[in-house]
Image (cartoon, rainbow, N blue to C red):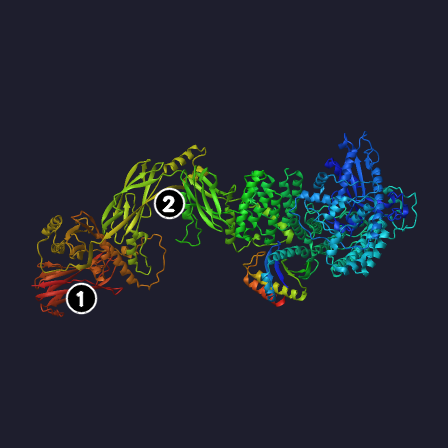
């Protein structure tokens, strides 16, 4: 079970990226073709944006559930009010926990936004955000 | 090969069209188009089989409404051969040769036909062949058997349709043969494919030969044509043909299928039966790369159980194949029924692969049936009906009308569409289950095609917005939309991403079925789930392109781009291989490949755009222009856009991936232009994300590409590659002090007036706008100047700069090139030099830099951006509109719009260049020699000496103005003035700092703030001498002589000229810009001479005192001699001090009652090692008296006391009331923090100050050293401290008493000492003088006292003295400066010494005034 989480800004640019590897699977860090995998993940998520752009106008919810799948991977999405997309690539369906995960992340993201030094649509470099995201991931995923 | 796999493609009969060489390409294609018009044949029109008639298995007469669909292809690959047994529609059923008779004018046509027959060997599956010879001439005989001449006269279409119908009939009859063979098969196996190998090692042609050999054995037995297998080599023709016609590069060899085609087998068996065994058959068996079919089967370790399973399943499979053939033959009802049977049978044996395939066929059949129903109405199966002769020959155009009246109620319902989808959803599930029941894996191709079929169907419905007859027709025709442009080809290039294709046609019966786009995408994306990389490369590419076609049609551009990216990824090895073969082959790269390249490049461009690295979003530094060979000169606007702010768009890591691929592709083509473009884009836009070593690699590859491109002529040499501006700052450097030029305003009255008018009450106003004039640098014409240029290298590799020069405009400028190297991620500052050749304004545009290995480029330095930033910083309180980052669009729209916005925003604000003023030539002076030794001078305190300097003009123009200014250590580092100090001390400190200049010269004026220059004329090369005076000031350790010089004549001349030459009257001329600009300022240069000064203290005055000159008993010589003595001794210079005192005691006392003199004494110590002569001069400012002078010589280490008679003085009240002056004219008034003093005290202080000043003014001392001849001033000021007592002595009183006795025997012995006789009536006159400014009214009290010699005093004088009147008298008011005399008559009655004490008291203020000496009368 492995997750890839990315926050995508207005111009298809990633604001924040992380691989979430549950501690039980930490051995997979040494996976030889992990690097290929990473790029594949990015391609999958990028391609899923097409679907997001269609689906987000058909619903009022911010959480769009699992919107796309690629082979055994699912892509879940959460669109914020500012049209920033949280995308999570996962290989097991668990809507509730992902929903909770996204909601928590949204809270953290808003905190980032409130930082007067943070410029919109720029990369999130806050280490606190990073650690919080990982903590939330540990809690919900 | 057909690119577009359609849902109805399984009903098409594939017919290959081959050219019979020689034929022109265009002619061939023209005829292909012609043949393609007849792709649909009504079964009713097909020529009935004459032998068997309606009883033939696939008789066309049974179901006359049915249609046969031909798919005319021009290329054919064998890599799906293993599937041909499974899905018959994949095979080539017929071959039609196309011959151009025009090419065969002189030769025999049969020759060509023979060629054609030979080529047929390659197509073993073809069961029917034809050879059409087009455009025959009259004289060409139509005698070749098997060759069909198509005349170009008459009803061509009718003729052609007849021919095609004939052809169809033959195919149908052959179907029957095949069917019988299928029926007789003992077992039917699922298709299996050998592991795909990329045949990279094998050269192309050998493969071709192998294939040739492989197919040679197969004997195509035809009914109409009997072809004897001839292994004559028709290879060149075939190869050429394939190369020409195939859309993808033909290089990859098809795979070899292990599953032997039952058709082949059947045919070979048939041939075995009918004719002799072919020798080539054995040859095939022995060929190593092709395993024999039986071997592969038995060896595949499936065991016997599998074999039995296969046997069990065979009947169902045969049914399915029959159904397939019925479908191909157009007999839809039979097809449907067979499919249904097949489905049932395969379901029971859980033969999922065949089941799903049968369902696919069924879906196709039902669809076609519906189409036919829509077309011709109700259908009655006429299986048993004999064919009616009237119906058989009918043109397709009339068919519709005949059956137009029939039942319309059975229109296709929308439900059929949903049914189809459901069916496909189910069959996909079956496909997924294949591996559960069979050890033979699912062929990925079949699965993928099924997905493609569904998604294309969905797409068609989606684009046409519903399901109706027209859509159905489109589906059957295999088109997506009615517009002819988008069928077949991937529309990716044609359709702009934002606009979805629209259909304009509207029909009444349209049933709107909303299909969400993601549903289509889901079907498409299912293709991924098959192991695509297991498929042959060409198939992979094919699927990818189909996917991208569909995805881009539904506006899923990212997904489309991804699949395009993947497809290109697959193409890459093919491209590399093709290039390898091209380079091996002796021919030059053909034009055909060029055309193909373009397509790929277009695809790359499109991928880039989707990923946010389209041409408008990136910095390419003009590489694109180079690619398109555009003119560089027209890109004035482009120069700006080079440096436009690169808004980060897209996903950097993906962009890097994409760009790397683009580079690889363009390298494989090879296309140097685009290679260069993509490399530069990658380097310039994403260098932040690229590791250092790769940056280095990219940079070096750019150079390599350029070199190669130049060689091949693809790339122009003069290209700018560096979009990143490495110039960050340019600044003019002030020249060294000796050469620097200083600007001075020319003071004219109007300017002064304005400054006064705007006058500020504050000397220093912190809020006043300050002009930032300090760092303004002026360049001098024809002189080398320096600029500090800061360069930054954002890349991870060192940049070698060659030939970096300044780029300027305005005044002609002669720059000096320079080379440097900027380290990776580093910043350096260069000092670029150059010479301006004219005076005026010089604009520094930037730098022209040539980076090693690249073209020279101008890097423009724009100040306006920086200014804007500063402005924004300044007025923060009102944030402007642009400050907020706004994102109106997101995703792809944002990418599209970002570039537009940038273009519109570009216009405001022209480029602002750095401006520098260049002024006319300036002279240059040099100090050639000075009188100083080592630049140092030693002085005694107060000494005056002078320095000589010799200066020479080493410049090009004369000097006409020189002024000197000085600084010294005491004035440049002044003692801090503590404002808490008393004013007197502050005055002393200020005086020391300001009023005693160490240096001075003839040009110095009294007022130190103004220094007046001197007009001289010094021509080039001339020398002159300047003398500077030096004063030995205590504490001075050094100083600087600064010499400002210039050539001002030009200024005057020019202004004069301008006024003369201008036609306007001189009054208005000041407003004209020329004159005003000329007269506002002038320029000077400076020379400095630092001087070290050492000041030694030689003489020290101390112990000041001021004493009364009191009356004394001894009166020496008479007055006259004394005055004479005085004069004599002055000349002598050795006047003893005692004499001086005597002189002053006696002087003028006869005239005045009061002594005018007081004594000033002081000690002078010689602290130096040589004797000094000190001369004092006391100037009492009397016109009548010449000043008193005295000289005394002091030996080293000695102290001598000096006594000086100084006239007492009286300063008027106005003088004394003046505040203590300050030398700082602009001193800010600060209210004193100290305690307020009482007014009397304040007055006393002022009094003290002013009297001291006066005293110092009167006494002047100089010294002289006899041995060395040095002389100087002795500064008395620091040692003089007055006490109040001393002041009282020095000062004349306000109220003065004058006492005199008058009588017959009164004799004045000394000052206020009188002798008189006893019993004599005398009068005492007491005069009171008022020196105050106001009149006073006083009471005078007089008290006579008798004093005895013992010192005792007797106050009771009743018997000794007679005095008239009261002792206390109120005097009349004394006016200012007036005098009142009170006369007291006296008569002494006894002898003795009497003293008269007196004082006055002010009536109003009760202030008492005393006299410090009293009158003494000795009565005898």
User: Which element carries disc 1, helix, strand or loop?
Assistant: loop
- The quarter in which the C terminus of chain B is drawn is bottom left
Residue B393 is left or right of residue A49, and the answer is right
Residue B1314, by quadrant, is bottom left
Residue B125 drawn at (x, y percent): 78, 46
Same chain shared by disc 2 and disc 1: yes
Within-10-Å neighbours for mark 1: few <14, some 14–19, many 20+: some
Chain at numbered mark 1: B
Residue behind mark 1: B1367
Residues at marks 2 and 1, CA–CA distance in whole angstroms? 87 Å
Residue furthest to the left in view is: B1420
- Which circle marks residue B147 in the picture? none
- x and y percentages locating residue A138 in the rendered image: 60, 66
Using residue A134 as the reference point, say whether residue B950 is left or right of it.
left
On the question of residue B499 being in view, the answer is no
- B1034 or B1211, nearer to the observer: B1034
Task: Please name the residue that numbered disc 2 is placed on.
Answer: B736
- Foreground residue among A138 and B858: A138
């Amino acid at each position: 079970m492995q997750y890839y989480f990315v926050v995508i800004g207005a111009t298809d640019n990633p604001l924040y990226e992380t691989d979430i590897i549950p501690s039980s699977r930490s051995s997979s860090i040494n996976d030889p073709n992990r690097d290929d995998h990473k790029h594949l993940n990015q391609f999958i998520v990028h391609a899923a944006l097409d679907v997001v752009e269609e689906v987000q106008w058909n619903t009022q919810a911010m959480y769009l559930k699992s919107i796309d799948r690629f082979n055994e991977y699912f892509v879940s999405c959460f669109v914020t009010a500012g049209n920033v997309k949280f995308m999570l690539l996962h290989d097991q369906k668990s809507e509730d926990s992902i929903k909770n995960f996204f909601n928590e992340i949204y809270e953290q993201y808003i905190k980032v936004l409130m930082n007067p030094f943070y410029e919109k649509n720029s990369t999130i470099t806050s280490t606190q955000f990073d650690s919080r995201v990982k903590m939330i991931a540990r809690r919900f995923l | 090969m057909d690119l577009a796999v359609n849902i109805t493609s399984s009903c098409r009969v594939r017919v290959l069209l081959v050219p019979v060489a020689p034929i022109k390409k265009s002619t061939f294609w023209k005829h292909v188009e012609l043949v393609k018009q007849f792709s649909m044949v009504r079964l009713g029109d097909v020529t009935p089989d004459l032998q068997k008639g309606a009883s033939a298995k696939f008789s066309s007469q049974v179901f006359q409404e049915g249609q046969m669909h031909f798919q005319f292809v021009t290329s054919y690959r064998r890599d799906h051969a293993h599937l041909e047994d499974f899905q018959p529609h994949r095979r080539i059923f017929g071959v039609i040769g196309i011959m151009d008779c025009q090419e065969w004018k002189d030769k025999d046509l049969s020759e060509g036909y023979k060629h054609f027959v030979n080529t047929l060997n390659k197509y073993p599956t073809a069961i029917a062949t034809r050879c059409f010879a087009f455009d025959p001439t009259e004289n060409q005989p139509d005698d070749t058997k098997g060759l069909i001449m198509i005349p170009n006269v008459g009803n061509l279409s009718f003729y052609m349709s007849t021919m095609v119908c004939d052809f169809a009939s033959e195919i149908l009859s052959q179907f029957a043969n095949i069917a019988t063979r299928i029926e007789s098969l003992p077992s039917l196996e699922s298709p299996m494919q050998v592991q795909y190998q990329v045949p990279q090692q094998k050269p192309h042609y050998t493969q071709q030969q192998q294939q040739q050999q492989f197919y040679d054995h197969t004997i195509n037995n035809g009914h109409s044509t009997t072809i004897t297998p001839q292994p004559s080599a028709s290879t060149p023709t075939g190869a050429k043909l394939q190369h020409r016609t195939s859309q993808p590069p033909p290089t990859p060899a098809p795979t070899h299928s292990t599953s032997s085609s039952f058709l082949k087998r059947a045919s070979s068996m048939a041939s075995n039966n009918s004719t002799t065994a072919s020798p080539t058959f054995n040859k095939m068996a022995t060929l190593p790369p092709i395993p024999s079919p039986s071997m592969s089967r038995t060896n595949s370790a499936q065991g016997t159980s599998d074999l039995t399973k296969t046997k069990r399943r065979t009947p169902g499979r045969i049914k399915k194949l029959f159904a397939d053939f019925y479908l191909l033959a157009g007999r839809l009802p039979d097809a449907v029924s067979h499919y249904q049977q097949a489905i049932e049978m395969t379901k029971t044996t859980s033969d999922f692969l065949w089941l799903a395939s049968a369902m696919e066929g069924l879906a196709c059949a039902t669809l076609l049936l519906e189409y036919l129903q829509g077309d011709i109405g109700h259908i009655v199966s006429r299986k048993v009906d004999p064919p009616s002769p009237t119906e058989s020959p009918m043109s397709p155009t009339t068919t519709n009308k005949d059956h137009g009246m029939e039942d319309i109620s059975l229109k296709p319902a929308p439900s059929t569409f949903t049914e189809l989808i459901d069916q496909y959803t189910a069959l996909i599930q079956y496909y997924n289950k294949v591996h559960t029941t069979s050890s033979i894996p699912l062929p990925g191709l079949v699965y993928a095609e099924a997905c493609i079929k569904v998604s294309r169907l969905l797409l068609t419905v989606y684009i046409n917005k519903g399901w109706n007859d027209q859509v159905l027709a489109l589906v059957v025709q295999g088109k997506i939309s009615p517009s002819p442009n988008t069928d077949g080809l991937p529309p990716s290039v044609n359709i702009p991403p934002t606009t979805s294709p629209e259909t304009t046609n509207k029909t009444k019966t349209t049933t709107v079925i909303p299909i969400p786009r993601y549903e289509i995408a889901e079907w498409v994306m299912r293709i991924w789930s098959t192991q695509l990389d297991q498929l042959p490369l060409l198939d992979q590419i094919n699927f990818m392109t189909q996917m991208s076609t569909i995805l881009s049609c539904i506006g899923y551009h990212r997904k489309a781009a991804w699949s395009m990216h993947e497809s290109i990824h697959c193409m890459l090895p093919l491209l590399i291989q093709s290039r390898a073969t091209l380079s091996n082959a002796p021919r030059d790269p053909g034009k055909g490949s060029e055309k193909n390249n373009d397509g790929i490049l277009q695809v790359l461009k499109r991928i880039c755009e989707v990923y946010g690295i389209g041409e408008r979003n990136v910095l390419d530094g003009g590489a694109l222009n180079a690619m398109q060979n555009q003119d560089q000169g027209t890109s004035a606007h482009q120069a700006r856009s080079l440096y436009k702010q690169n808004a980060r768009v897209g996903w950097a890591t993906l962009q890097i991936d994409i760009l790397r691929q683009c580079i690889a592709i363009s390298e494989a083509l090879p296309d140097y232009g685009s290679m260069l473009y993509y490399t530069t884009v990658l380097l310039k836009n994403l260098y932040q994300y690229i590791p250092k070593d790769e940056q280095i690699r990219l940079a070096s590859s750019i150079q390599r590409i350029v070199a190669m491109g130049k060689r091949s002529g693809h790339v122009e040499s003069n290209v700018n590659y560096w979009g990143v501006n490495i110039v960050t700052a340019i600044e003019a450097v002030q020249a060294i002090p000796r050469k620097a030029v200083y600007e001075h305003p020319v003071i004219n009255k109007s300017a002064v007036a304005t400054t006064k008018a705007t006058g500020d009450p504050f000397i220093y106003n912190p809020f006043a706008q300050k002009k930032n004039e300090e760092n303004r640098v002026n360049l001098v014409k024809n002189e080398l100047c320096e600029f500090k240029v800061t360069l930054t290298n954002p890349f991870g590799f060192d940049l070698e700069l060659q030939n970096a020069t300044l780029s300027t405009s305005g005044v002609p400028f002669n720059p000096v090139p320079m080379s440097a190297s900027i380290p990776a991620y580093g910043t350096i500052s260069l000092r670029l030099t150059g010479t301006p050749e004219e005076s005026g304004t010089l604009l520094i545009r930037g730098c022209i830099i040539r980076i090693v290995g690249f073209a020279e480029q101008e890097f423009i330095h724009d100040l306006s951006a920086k200014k804007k930033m500063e402005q924004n910083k300044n007025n923060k309180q009102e944030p402007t509109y642009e400050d907020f980052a706004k994102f109106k669009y997101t995703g792809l729209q944002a990418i599209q719009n970002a570039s537009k916005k940038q273009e519109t925003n570009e216009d405001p604000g022209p480029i602002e260049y750095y401006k520098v003023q260049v002024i006319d030539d300036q002279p240059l002076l040099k100090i050639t020699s000075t009188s100083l030794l080592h630049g140092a001078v030693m002085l005694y305190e107060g000494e005056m000496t002078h320095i000589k300097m010799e200066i020479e003009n080493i410049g090009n123009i004369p000097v006409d103005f020189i002024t000197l200014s000085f600084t010294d250590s005491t004035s440049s580092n002044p003692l801090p003035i503590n404002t808490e100090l008393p004013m007197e001390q502050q005055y002393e400190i200020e005086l020391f700092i300001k009023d005693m200049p160490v240096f001075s010269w003839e040009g110095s004026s009294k007022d130190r703030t103004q220094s007046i220059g001197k007009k001289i004329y010094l021509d080039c090369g001339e020398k002159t001498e300047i003398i500077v005076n030096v004063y030995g000031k205590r504490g001075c350790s050094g100083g600087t002589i600064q010499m400002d010089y210039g050539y001002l004549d030009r200024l005057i001349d020019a202004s004069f000229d301008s006024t003369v030459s201008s036609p306007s009257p001189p009054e208005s001329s000041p407003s004209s810009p020329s004159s005003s600009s000329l007269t506002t300022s002038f320029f000077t240069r400076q020379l400095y001479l630092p001087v070290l000064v050492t000041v030694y203290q030689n003489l020290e005055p101390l112990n000041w005192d001021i004493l009364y000159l009191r009356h004394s008993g001894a009166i020496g010589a008479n007055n006259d001699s004394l005055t004479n003595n005085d004069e004599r001794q002055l000349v002598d210079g050795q006047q003893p001090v005692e004499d001086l005192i005597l002189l002053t005691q006696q002087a003028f006392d006869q005239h005045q009652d009061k002594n005018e003199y007081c004594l000033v004494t002081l000690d002078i110590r010689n602290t130096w090692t040589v004797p000094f002569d000190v001369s004092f001069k006391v100037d009492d400012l009397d016109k009548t008296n010449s000043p008193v002078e005295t000289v005394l010589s002091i030996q080293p280490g000695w102290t001598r006391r000096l006594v000086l008679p100084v006239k007492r003085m009286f300063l008027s009240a106005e003088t004394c009331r003046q505040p203590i002056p300050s030398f700082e004219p602009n001193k800010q008034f600060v209210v004193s923090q100290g305690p307020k003093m009482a007014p009397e005290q304040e007055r006393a202080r002022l009094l003290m100050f002013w009297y001291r000043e006066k005293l110092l003014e009167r006494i002047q001392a100089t010294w002289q050293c006899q041995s060395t001849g040095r002389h100087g001033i002795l500064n008395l000021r620091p040692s003089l401290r007055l006490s109040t007592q001393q002041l009282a002595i020095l000062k004349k009183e306000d109220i003065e008493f004058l006492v005199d006795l008058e009588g017959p025997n009164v004799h004045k012995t000394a000052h206020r000492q009188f002798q008189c006789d006893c019993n004599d009536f005398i009068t005492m006159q007491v005069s009171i003088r008022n020196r105050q400014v106001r009149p006073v009214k006083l009471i005078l009290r007089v008290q006579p006292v008798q004093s005895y010699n013992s010192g005792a005093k007797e106050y009771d004088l009743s018997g000794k003295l007679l005095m008239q009147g009261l002792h206390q008298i109120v005097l009349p008011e004394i006016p200012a400066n007036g005098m009142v005399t009170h006369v007291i008559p006296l008569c002494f009655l006894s002898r003795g010494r009497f003293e008269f004490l007196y004082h006055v008291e002010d009536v109003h203020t009760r202030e008492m005034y005393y006299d410090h000496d009293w009158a003494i009368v000795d009565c005898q």
